[in-house]
Every structure is written in structure tokens, then in C-alpha cells.
Image: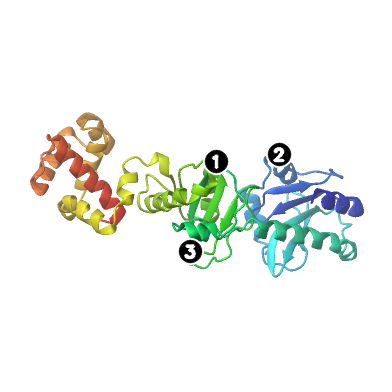
Amino acid sequence: MQDIVDEISRLLDASVTLEDRSFNLLAYGAQIGDVDRVRQESILRRRATAEVRAHFEAYGIATATAPVRIPGLPGMLGRVCVPLRQGGVTYGYLWLIDSGALTDERLAAVAPLMARAAALLAREARGRHAPLRAFFSTDPATRASVAVDAEGPVAAVAVRTPADDADGPWTLPRGVLADPDLGEPLLAVLAPASQAGEVARRMQGLYGTAAGVGGVRDDAQEAWESWREALLALRVAEHVPRQGPVASWPDLGAYRMLARLSHRDLADLAGESAALWAAGGDLAGSVEAYLDHAGQVKETAALLGVHRQTLYYRLGKAEHLTGLDLADGEDRLLLHLSLKAAALTGP
């Protein structure tokens, strides 16, 4: 791709950059003529800012089938954006700073090079889709039936996707595999352990939903266990705002135990605090904050913004409603877990 960019830059005598569909910089040519802030930041940061992306996307480049001319603004030179498409899919963008000399005829002359760049992007994107649905199966025979090119240490990532998105991510870092074909709005990802957290955050940001990261496995053949954990972490990320929108299994504490429970067992446990939720107001939240802070009344009252006597009143009311004694360690533990369980099931 770098060779293609250099050749296009030479033939058109223009500054060229090549980005993937998420505006991550893949290659850029030598600077020719004036340079503006947008090009500088794209090269230095290796990707365009959200503001720049929104500005360019407003010109319809994601669905355009021909070069799009984008006029200049103060601090930004005019550009030609060439969507790199194959099979009706846009895989990236070729950007050329336009001094006014980039006629349609000159652009047509380098169309074969642009088509080659599109083909390379498409091949790379397809090559990173792997049959993870089978590779993550709990059945050893099913796992053995597929070949996945991965080496440990690895971690699995589960990402919730919009219901209308069935194609998966357009690009992923090298060494990261994905499978959007899970039969539900869910993306399975297998990443080197050192990249898993960043990939999860990137995918979550792309879809605006939630993601869960499983524990690290030194042997890629044990990645299915990490996938089970990623699914549970995703469940926590979707239901517990404090843990989301990206939850990592090793960091979930007591939720690692709770997330493993069946919905029925969780509902039974949540039932221990049902009276607090039924009472409404701030009762359940006040008690959970008190227990989260190890029974420290002063700190909890300050956090809640109430007088200590108000908190004492709420705690007494909670004891009356639940029949549990907050001075008893086992009762406190039961109520604390119940409130956490309610977050996973709904009060």
C-alpha cells in the first residue's frame, strides 16, 4: 500500500494519504506543496480526529462510488477523497490535497492503482475474519474441526453490536481475529493479550454498545475459556454502569461469582433486597453505598450528600424491611451480594 501511495503521489504530483474506514492512517506520501493542520495531525496521531471525521463524512464519502471533492476551509486545504470500494463495500479512503490541478481525467489515469489499493484492503479485512464461533465451542471435537492461526498469550473479547450490523469491523490491528457470524448481534474477537483491552475499547467506541474482555490464556487452544469469561464480563458491562462500558473479567471482583449464577439463582439472591427496591427512593442505593464503603457512616453520608442521621434512619429502615441485622457480618454479606445481584437481574 505504501508503494501504491508513493506512485499515485508521483503521477499526480500531489500529497496523498491512505486511511482505513475508521480513519486510521495506513500510509502517506511525501509532502508536495502546502500542508495543512488536518494532514499534519493525521500523520502525527496516526488517525483523524472525531471532528475531522464528522466533517468529511457529512459529504457522503462512506457510500460514494466516485471521487468526492471537499472544498477548503480556513486551516484546511481542499481535498479529493477517493472511496476505496470492492464488492459494494467501502474499505478505506485515499486522500489527495487538491491545488486545483486534479482533474477528472488525471484521477481516471490512476484508477487502476486505486482499485489495487481497494483490493488489498478488502483482502486484509477478509483475512482477519476467522471461524471463532467453532474455535470457542465448549465441545473439543468442534474446536478441533477448525484451524485458527493464533499464538498465545491471547484473550477473547465479546462486543455487543447493533442489530442491523452483520458484517463485523472493517479493519483490525494485525494479529487480531474476529468473527461476526455468531447468529446474534455479537462480535467475537481473539487478540494478543497485550492488545485485548485496547481492541475492546476501540470496538466498543465503534459500535457505541458494550464489551467484555476475558482472562489471558497462554495457550491459544484454551481461548474458549477466555471467551466464556468475556461473555460474562459483557453481561456485567451491560447491566452495571460502574463496570461498563468495557468490563475486564480479572477486574470484576465479586461479579465474577455472581455472573456465573443462573438467572433463577440470581433472582433468588436479589429477592433478599427486594423490599428495599419496593420502598423506592434512595433506600437501596444508600444501603449499597454504605456496604461498599465498609460501613463507614461519615464517608458514606458525605458521598450521598446527606446528614449522618439521615443515613442512620435509612439503615434502620432497611433492617426493618429485610429482617437482616447490619451489625451481623453474614447478614451484611448476604444483603451486599443481593444488591449486586439485583444489578444483573433488574430490581
Residue 206, quarter of picture:
bottom right
Q: Is there any visible trace of residue 82 in the rendered image?
A: no
Visual colour scheme: rainbow
- Tell me where residue 226 appears, x and y as whole percent: 46, 48
Q: Which residue is mark 1?
A: 153
Query: Mark 3 falls on what kind of element?
Result: loop
Q: Estimate the spatial distance between the alpha carbons at disc 3 and disc 2, rounded to whole Å.
A: 35 Å
Q: Is residue 165 above or below residue 148?
A: below
Pointer 2 and pointer 1: residues touching (CB < 8 Å)?
A: no
First in sequence, mark 3 or 2: give its number: 2
Depth check, mark 3 against mark 2: the one in front is: 3
298 vs 169, left or right, is left
Q: Position of residue 240 (x, y in %)?
A: 35, 49
The residue tagged 2 is 44
Crowd class of label 1 (few under 14; some 14 to 19; many from 20; radius 10 Å): some
Nearer mark to the viewer, of 2 and 1: 1
Residue type of the residue flagged with mark 2: Leu
Q: Nearer the viewer, residue 302 or 160?
A: 160
Query: In the image, 171: left or right of 17?
Result: left
Instruction: Give the residue at mark 3.
Output: 185
Residue 305, how many percent across, how many down?
A: 26, 37
